[in-house]
Image: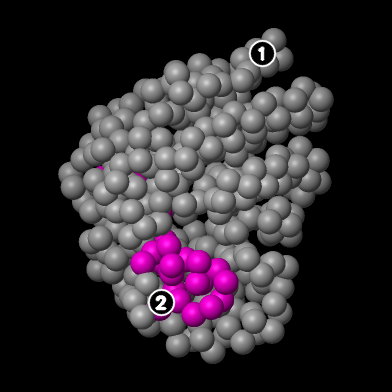
Amino acid sequence: MKMNAIERLNAFIRGEGPDRIPVYPLMMTRAARMIDLPFSQYCLDYKKQADAMIFAAEKVGAECVHPSGYPYCEAQAYGLKVEFPEDDLPLAKTHLINGKEQFILIWPINPKVHDFMMNRVKGVEYFKEQKGDDLVICGHHEGVLAEYADLRGLGEACMDLYDYPDEMKSMLGTICENACRWGAIQAAAGAHFMSIGDAACSQIGPDLYEEFVYPHHVKMVEFYHQLGVRVKFHICGDIRPILPLLIKTGADMIDVDHLVDDIGPFVDLLGSHQVFCGNLDPVSVIRDGTVGQIQAEAETWVRQSRGRGIISGGCEIPLNTPLENLLALYECGEKLLPLWRDLKTTWRDQK
C-alpha cells in the first residue's frame, strides 16, 4: 500500500514496514537553481523558497521540505547585521559580540516582532497549505552553541566556555528558551518535526558538550515531544565523540555526516523510536559519483545502520549536483527496501 510521507516516516521509525525507505536530501541552493531563483530571494521570500523546494522535491521524488535557507535568521533578531548578495550565500562580516561587556545582547526574543523569523513560520504555513501531509514539513532553528558561535565567532565561542563558564551557561539557557519559543510557533503552523542545527558541537568534545550543551538539547527534545513534534539533530562534522550523548537526548532522528565512517558501533544505543539520517558524502558521492556508486554507498549505509537510517547526504546537496544523481539517490529508497526487510529482524529483536 502506497503511503504518504508522514505515514512512511512514522512506519520507518517504528520499524513497522514502510512502502520504501525515506529519502531526505537537504536541498537549498540546488532547489533555488532548479527554478533559476537568485539565492537572496530564496532566503528572503518564503513563497519563492517554498515553491522552489516543492518543485525540487517533486522533481527528484524527495519527501521532506523545510523553510530555512541561511543560518543567521535568529542572529538578526539579536542584532547581527547580515548582507544578502544577489545570488550567493548570506554574509555576516562582523561579529555582534566582541567581548564580555556585550553578553547583555543575549536577551529574550519575541519571534513575532521579527519579520525574518516569522518568514520561516509563514513558510511552514505555506507548505502546509500546498502539500498537507504529502510532504514531511521540517521546522528549523539553530542549536544553542551554533547560535552563540554565529554571534561571537567559533573560536571565541569555544574559548568563552573556558573563560566565562557561568556566563555561558546563562546565555545558552536564554538562547534555548528563545529557540523553543520560535519553534513552538513553527510547530503550531504545521511543522511535523523540528530540525536543530548545532554544528559547533562537533568541535568541543564530549566533556564540554555534556556540561554546556547536552542539558539544553535534552530540554529541547522534551519540549517538542510535549507538543507532539518529532526532533532531528543536524550536527555537521565527526560527531562520534558526542554521538552516545546525542542519542541519549531522546531525539527521534540524528543526522550523521559522511565524516562518521562507520555508524555500526552506535546502532545498539538507539531507543525504539530513534533512527539515524545520512550519511553519504554530498560531494564525492552524490555530486561527483556515478549512479552505481551512489547506490552502493546507500546500500553500505543501510547495512551499517542495520536498517535504521534514513537515506540522505551527510549535509547539504551541492549546487551543481546532476539531476540524474539525485534521481538515483531517491530510487535507492525502493531498491533497498528488500534489504531493509531482511535487516529489520535485528531491530525488532532489540525492541
Quarter residue 22 falls in: bottom left
Which mark is drawn over residue 84? none
How was the colour assigned to the protein in this rendering?
one colour
User: Is residue 217 at all visible to an observer of this figure?
Assistant: no
Q: Crowding near pointer 2: few (<14 within 10 Å), some, many (20+)?
A: many
Q: Position of residue 259 (x, y in %)?
A: 57, 60
Q: Residue furthest top?
A: 101
User: Is residue 85 at all visible to an observer of this figure?
Assistant: yes
Give the residue pinned by disc 1: 104
Q: What residue is shown at x 66% (from left), y 13% (from top)?
A: 104
Say whether disc 2 or disc 1 marks the residue closer to the N-terminus: 2
* Range covered by the magenta-colored residues: 4-33
Give the residue pinned by disc 2: 20
Amino acid at pointer 1: Ile
Q: Is residue 6 left or right of residue 161?
A: left
Amino acid at pointer 2: Arg
Q: What residue is shown at x 63% (from left), y 66% (from top)?
A: 273
Q: Position of residue 139 (x, y in %)?
A: 46, 44
Quadrant holding the N terminus: bottom left
